[in-house]
């Protein structure tokens, strides 16, 4: 085989090993006025909250629980893994600044690993599953289309296992969970799990990071 062909093969292998370049969503929400909400679950809400709090256009992020009943939406019960809840965040954002699709890009590229079933990093159990809880038909279509787009592009080496379900309720977590990473930067869990994701966001998606 000629040198040029060898180089082409090696380049293809390297690209496969590294994964394809992360794309923007081909299908995104239509222009809209006023603030909107998105609810996403990607492991410990301390970490996902930390990432989205620095995204341009995000007005607030609240840690909480979705997927189960209101009566069992507290940290002690959810941590048992049998309530149906997932630790998640409710994002209030300005779609004129950041779209729902761009939030999903941050979610899939930076905030968590969508290929691990019921697990993120050191945390295991269905309460740490990957999930998109859509609030309307448009969010449902954008989320499902983006997952198909990522799968077709072979961005990840393994299959995406993210659940896409209608939001039936969001229940804010206890006060001590809110803004946890910002309030506890010295916590080893935050240093090893949340801080690297925020750093990755700044490197991978600088245009989506809030200006200081």
Image: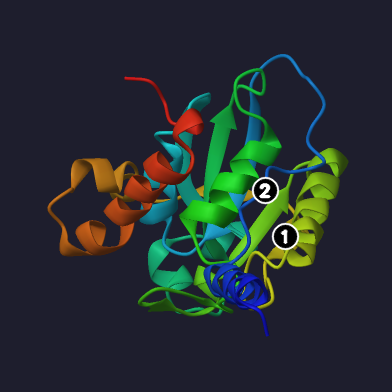
Residue 23: mark: 2
The residue located at (16%, 63%) in the rendering is 188
Q: Residues within 10 Å of mark 1 (few under 14, many from 20)?
A: many
Asked whether the beta carbons under mark 1 and mark 2 sit within 8 Å of each other, the answer is yes
**Disc 1 target residue:** 150
Outermost residue on the bottom side: it is: 1
In what quadrant of the picture does the C terminus appear? top left
* Relative height, residue 83 to residue 204 (above, below): below
In percent of width and height, residue 103 lies at: 60, 40
Q: Nearer the viewer, residue 194 or 21?
A: 21
In percent of width and height, residue 18 lies at: 53, 68
* Relative height, residue 105 to residue 68 (above, below): above
Asked if one can make out residue 192 in the rendered structure from this viewpoint, the answer is: yes
In percent of width and height, residue 79 lies at: 42, 73
Relative side of 145 to 73, left or right: right
Q: Secondary structure at mark 2?
A: loop
In percent of width and height, residue 142 lies at: 80, 45
């Amino acid at each position: 085989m000629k040198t040029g062909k060898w180089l082409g093969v090696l380049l293809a292998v390297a690209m496969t090993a590294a994964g394809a370049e992360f794309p923007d969503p081909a299908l995104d929400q239509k222009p809209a006025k006023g603030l909107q909400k998105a609810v996403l679950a990607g492991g410990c809400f301390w970490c996902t909250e930390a990432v989205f709090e620095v995204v341009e256009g995000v007005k607030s992020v609240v840690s909480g629980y979705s997927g189960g009943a209101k009566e069992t939406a507290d940290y002690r019960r959810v941590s048992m893994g049998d309530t149906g809840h997932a630790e998640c965040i409710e994002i209030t954002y300005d779609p004129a600044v950041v779209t729902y699709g761009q939030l999903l890009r941050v979610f899939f590229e930076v905030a968590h690993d969508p290929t691990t079933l019921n697990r993120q990093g050191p945390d295991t159990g269905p309460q740490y599953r990957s999930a998109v809880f859509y609030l309307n038909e448009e969010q449902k279509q954008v989320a499902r289309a983006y997952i198909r787009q990522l799968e077709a592009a072979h961005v990840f080496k393994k299959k995406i296992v993210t659940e896409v379900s209608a939001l039936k309720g969001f229940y804010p977590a206890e006060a001590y969970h809110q803004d946890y990473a910002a309030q506890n930067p010295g916590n080893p869990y935050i240093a090893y799990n949340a801080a690297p994701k925020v750093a990755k966001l700044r490197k991978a998606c600088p245009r989506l990071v809030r200006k200081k």
